[in-house]
Amino acid sequence: NSSEITLINTVFNTNSSLKDNGGAIYNTGDLTIKNGDFENNKVTSGEGDGGALYTNTGALTLVDTDFSENYTKENAEGDLGYGGAIYAQGGTIDIQGGEYENNHALTGGAIYVSGKATSVNIENVEFEGNWASDIGALGIFGKNATLTNLTFTDNYTTGQYKEFDFNDGGGALFFGAAAQATGVASLRNRGREGSEFPMPLPLVTLEGEDRTLALARIS
């Protein structure tokens, strides 16, 4: 896609990319998806990112769209295999509603937003059971990020690829850039055994039992 497209009530199931990014969709335009469902999509070669959806430039808007059982495989160098459900390389990201369940990747089990993204808004989203070697559910490196009313449950990191020089991000959420977050609830998210996760920025409010394992950030 390199134009302006809106998809409504669309299902993407069991699609795969053998040698590139985006198991179901590769977006370079303005893409809006409403009431979509992405299940069991994958990048299997270790030569791409975004198990279900890869967005490069333009604007990505997702409204009440669910992602489950999507994944992307790592490569030998550890520089591919990011974003089990979504990898956002750039542009603007606006996610309103939806559930992300049991997605996995090398880094960013559900969503990975790179530092080239110019605006990020994620609100009213549930993350459950997502996992990765590093950053269990959501990794935010993009600019101007706002997170509102997010719930993280049973997401985790494995730390299994110790040969890669990772930051060992949080079991639920990792900030690589300044962000504003309110109403972030966390329950039973966990990092690799023995890991220590610093508390996030003061403006992040957590409700749950694992306050030190839920989040991590770097300066």
Image: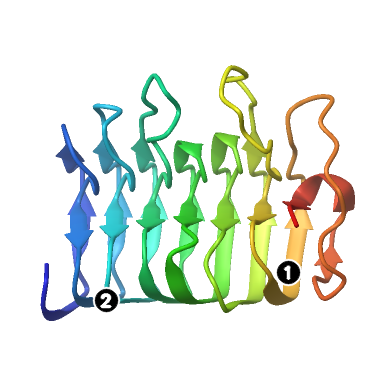
Residue 184: mark: 1
Horizontally, residue 105 falls left or right of residue 130, namely left
Task: Judge whether residue 96 can be spotted in this image.
Answer: no
Mark 2 or mark 1: whose residue is earlier in sequence: 2
Task: Judge whether residue 14 can be spotted in this image.
Answer: yes
Identify the secondary structure beneath mark 1.
Answer: strand
With respect to residue 96, does 175 lie above or below? above
Residue 58: mark: 2
The residue under the point 28% across, 62% down is 56
Pinpoint residue 4: horizontal percent, then vertical percent. Answer: 14, 82
Towards the viewer: 74 or 114: 114
Residue 192: mark: none
From the image, which quarter does the N terminus lie in?
bottom left
Kindly indicate whether the residue at mark 1 contacts the one at mark 2 (C-beta within 8 angstroms): no
Give the quarter of the image for residue 32: bottom left
From the image, which quarter does the C terminus lie in?
bottom right
